[in-house]
């Protein structure tokens, strides 16, 4: 059984806004999650990739089962779209207990958390998505619940306020965060195990796509699978989304079997280039190279040049561009690397990449 509390299911950006379901965003709204639900693996054996995390998590769960007790609290950390929510569901499934789902933005008051904990039964699993966005008052109550399995409910205000202790059944808290650096140390230290999820390799994404294609009853050639995997930015959520868009293209064009040409045409239609860049990514690189000679240029100036908000460029475009080695963040501003010039089909000037100090990371 999965109980979902208000505030769960949507992806949030740094400013608290919900991301749209653009084809290459790793975030997901409620509609996207509904589409994903049919493709989620139901056990650790079915889960593809993250082998080290799977082995570690399997050990934690087997040890808890052998003791006949609840498992330690677990924190899933890593970029969006890598399977944190899926692993939380698998944990509850493996433990044979109900999963209750909420999110950090939904826990804005201590009373929100108190109401949640008062309804939990012995051995159940509570999953808090984006746990780093939990309000401070609720967070402080969570410390005591995780460690001592009790909370103090404050009744009244001022000098007449009284504290009523409330015992909480032993439960397992699963937290998920895309920004573990924002978690306060006291909260992070109360998790018995932190699972750090990493981006997928293309061959792992190919396995994800093949499994999803079987579930969606899609006939697809290996070359098309590899083409989609290469453009999926190391993220299973994006891989599954691109597979659905390619399937739509094949159905409309009455293509019974998806080959590489069909996949390429579909992905080009959705502005996904051969290495997974989208319109915004390319706009950032083109502005850097054509308008600013490769940089360095300030983030605000770059955002104006591409017609986007500063936060959008920094939170949506930059991470993948930096990870791909196409853009460098330097103390003097953003710089296009020689690889970016080459990807755009431009010839870099002789000075591009010569001044190594430009590529020192920001403090």
Image (cartoon, rainbow, N blue to C red):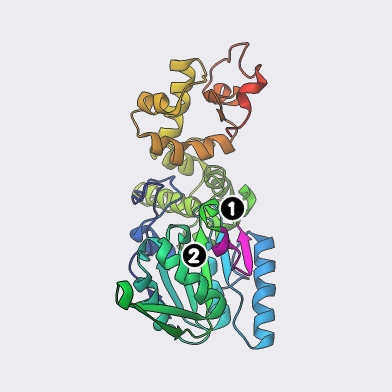
- Left or right, 175 with respect to 113, comes to right
Say few, some or many: other residues with alpha carbon within 10 Å of mark 1 (under 14 / 14 to 19 / 20 or more): many
Q: Is residue 7 magenta?
A: no
Which corner quadrant holds the C terminus? top right
Q: Earlier in the sequence, mark 1 or mark 2?
A: 2
Instruction: Classify 323 as above or below 101.
Output: above
- Left or right, 184 with respect to 37, comes to right
Q: Residue at x 35, y 26 (%)?
A: 304
Residue 98 screen position, x and y as percent: 47, 81
Q: What is the span of residues highlighted in magenta in the rendered image?
A: 185-198
- Left or right, 350 with respect to 282, comes to right
Residue 169 screen position, x and y as percent: 50, 86
Residue on which the image places disc 2: 85
Q: How many marks?
A: 2
Q: Nearer the viewer, residue 337 or 236?
A: 337
Residue on which the image places disc 1: 206
Residue 318 screen position, x and y as percent: 49, 36
Q: Is residue 13 something that shows in the picture?
A: yes
Q: Nearer the viewer, residue 192 or 272?
A: 192
Q: Check disc 2 and report its element: helix, strand or loop.
A: helix
Using the rendered view, name the quadrant where residue 47 is placed: bottom right
Residue most toward the top? 350
Q: Are marks 1 and 2 in contact (CB under 8 Å)?
A: no
- Disc number for residue 30: none
Using the rendered view, name the quadrant where residue 108 is placed: bottom left
Q: Check disc 1 and report its element: helix, strand or loop.
A: helix
Instruction: Classify 121 as above or below 218.
Output: below
Q: Is residue 42 something that shows in the picture?
A: no
Measured in 3D between alpha carbons, the distance from the residue under mark 1 to the one under mark 2, in whole angstroms, is 21 Å
Q: Residue at x 62, y 63 (%)?
A: 194
Which corner quadrant holds the N terminus? bottom left
- Left or right, 235 with respect to 35, comes to right
């Amino acid at each position: 059984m999965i109980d979902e509390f208000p505030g769960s299911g949507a992806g949030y950006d740094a400013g608290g806004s919900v991301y749209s379901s653009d084809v290459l965003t790793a975030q997901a709204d409620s509609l996207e999650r509904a589409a994903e639900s049919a493709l989620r693996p139901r056990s650790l054996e079915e889960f593809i990739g993250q082998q080290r995390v799977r082995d570690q998590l399997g050990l934690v769960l087997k040890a808890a089962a052998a003791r006949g007790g609840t498992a330690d609290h677990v924190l899933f950390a890593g970029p969006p779209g890598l399977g944190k929510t899926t692993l939380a569901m698998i944990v509850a499934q493996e433990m044979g207990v109900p999963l209750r789902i909420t999110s950090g933005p939904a826990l804005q008051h201590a009373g929100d958390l108190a109401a949640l904990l008062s309804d939990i039964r012995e051995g159940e699993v509570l999953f808090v998505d984006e746990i780093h966005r939990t309000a401070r008052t609720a967070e402080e109550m969570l410390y005591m619940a995780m460690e001592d399995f009790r909370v103090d409910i404050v009744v009244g205000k001022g000098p007449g306020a009284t504290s009523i202790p409330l015992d909480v059944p032993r439960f397992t808290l699963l937290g998920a965060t895309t920004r573990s650096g924002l978690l306060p140390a006291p909260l992070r230290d109360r998790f018995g195990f932190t699972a750090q999820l990493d981006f997928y390799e293309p061959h792992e994404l190919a396995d994800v796509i093949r499994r999803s294609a079987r579930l969606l009853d899609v006939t697809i050639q290996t070359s098309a699978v590899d083409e989609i995997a290469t453009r999926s930015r190391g993220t299973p959520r994006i891989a599954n989304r691109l597979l659905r868009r390619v399937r739509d293209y094949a159905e409309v064009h009455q293509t019974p079997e998806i080959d590489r040409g069909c996949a390429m045409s579909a992905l080009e239609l959705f502005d996904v280039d051969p290495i997974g860049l989208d319109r915004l990514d390319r706009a950032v690189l083109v502005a850097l190279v054509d308008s600013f000679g490769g940089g360095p240029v300030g983030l605000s100036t770059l955002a104006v040049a591409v017609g986007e908000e500063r936060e959008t460029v920094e939170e949506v475009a930059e991470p993948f561009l930096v990870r791909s080695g196409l853009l460098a963040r330097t103390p003097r501003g953003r710089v296009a690397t020689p690889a970016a010039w080459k990807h755009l089909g431009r010839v870099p000037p002789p000075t591009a990449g010569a001044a190594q100090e430009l590529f020192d990371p920001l403090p």
